[in-house]
Image: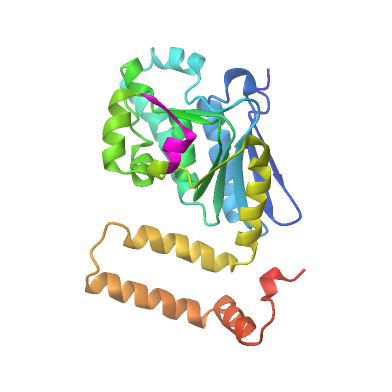
Amino acid sequence: MTTDHPFLSETDADGTAWVTLNRPDVHNAFDDALIARLTAELHLLNDDHSVRAVVLGAAGRSFSAGADLNWMKRMAGYTHAENMEDARALAGLMHALNHLNKPTIAMVQGAAYGGGVGLVACCDIAIAADRATFCLSEVKLGLIPAVISPFVVAAMGQRAARRYFLTAERFDAAEALRLGLVHRVVDEGHLRATVDETLATLQANGPRAMAAAKDLIFAVADRPADDAVLEDTARRIADRRASDEGREGVGAFLEKRKPDWMVG
């Protein structure tokens, strides 16, 4: 069994943290222990200034089957209060991943079911192998994809969610691409190389600017362009222009040199 190390985390010389779900014997399903440990790891990576990007992948044939069966058996005997505590923990994991202050990439090599779809939706960029499959299977068990729903609906839209939340149909990587749940679909043999190409693109960008751009999206999404939003966006760009990173980036462009975050 691999449960002593339910995920692996290693940061390379370029500042990419490779977080790999490591329970292939149970299709990388998660339980309360994995949720707690992975959430704690994401908080550490969020606060680590040497980390430039995070790649979430998985060992074995499946990306993640969602909830672990043994965990679900234990849940059956929980009180309402215990179920609330459990659900809040899963919501905390999704929130930590969704709001990480650096770029995140989901490297989806296989099946993503239930909460596994939530993990994909919470990453900024999702790259899937052509053999990957997806399913929001909760209603088959008399449940609902509750805590992952804000992130999944944001990724694939309300109309698609109204179909797949209710039917629990399995869909392939091509459909996930059409829906916007993933951004690229590649041959399984080119998955790692495609992720590496995306990381190289991200390395060219200002680290703090990417964090600010991500926060900007959350600030303006689904809001009207009223005076408050316009004032907020004006403040944000003024702050970036005055920042050390902003000055360095513009200076490097005008001087036709690489900015300092690309040197070394």
Query: What quarter of the picture does the C terminus occupy?
Result: bottom right
* Lateral position of residue 119 relative to residue 58, left or right: left
Rendered location of residue 74, percent (x, y): 45, 14
Rendered location of residue 183, percent (x, y): 49, 47
Query: What quarter of the picture does the N terminus occupy?
Result: top right
Q: Nearer the viewer, residue 97 or 203?
A: 203
Q: Is residue 20 above or below residue 16?
A: above
Task: Using the rendered image of the protein, determine whether residue 45 is visible from the camera's viewpoint.
Answer: yes
* Lateral position of residue 11 relative to residue 253, left or right: right
Q: Nearer the viewer, residue 177 or 227?
A: 177
Q: Residue at x 65, y 54 (%)?
A: 197
Residue 174 on the magenta segment: yes
Q: Nearer the viewer, residue 28 or 5?
A: 28
Q: Nearer the viewer, residue 139 or 76?
A: 139
Q: Residue at x 63, y 23 (%)?
A: 24
Rendered location of residue 26, percent (x, y): 58, 19
Q: Residue at x 43, y 77 (%)?
A: 237
Rendered location of residue 65, percent (x, y): 50, 24
Q: Which residues are magenta?
A: 169-177
* Lateral position of residue 195 relative to residue 68, left or right: right
Q: Is residue 23 above or below residue 178?
A: above
Place residue 13 in its image quadrant. Answer: bottom right
Place residue 159 in its image quadrant. Answer: top left
Place residue 85 in its image quadrant. Answer: top left
Residue 69 on the magenta segment: no
Q: Residue at x 32, y 30 (%)?
A: 164
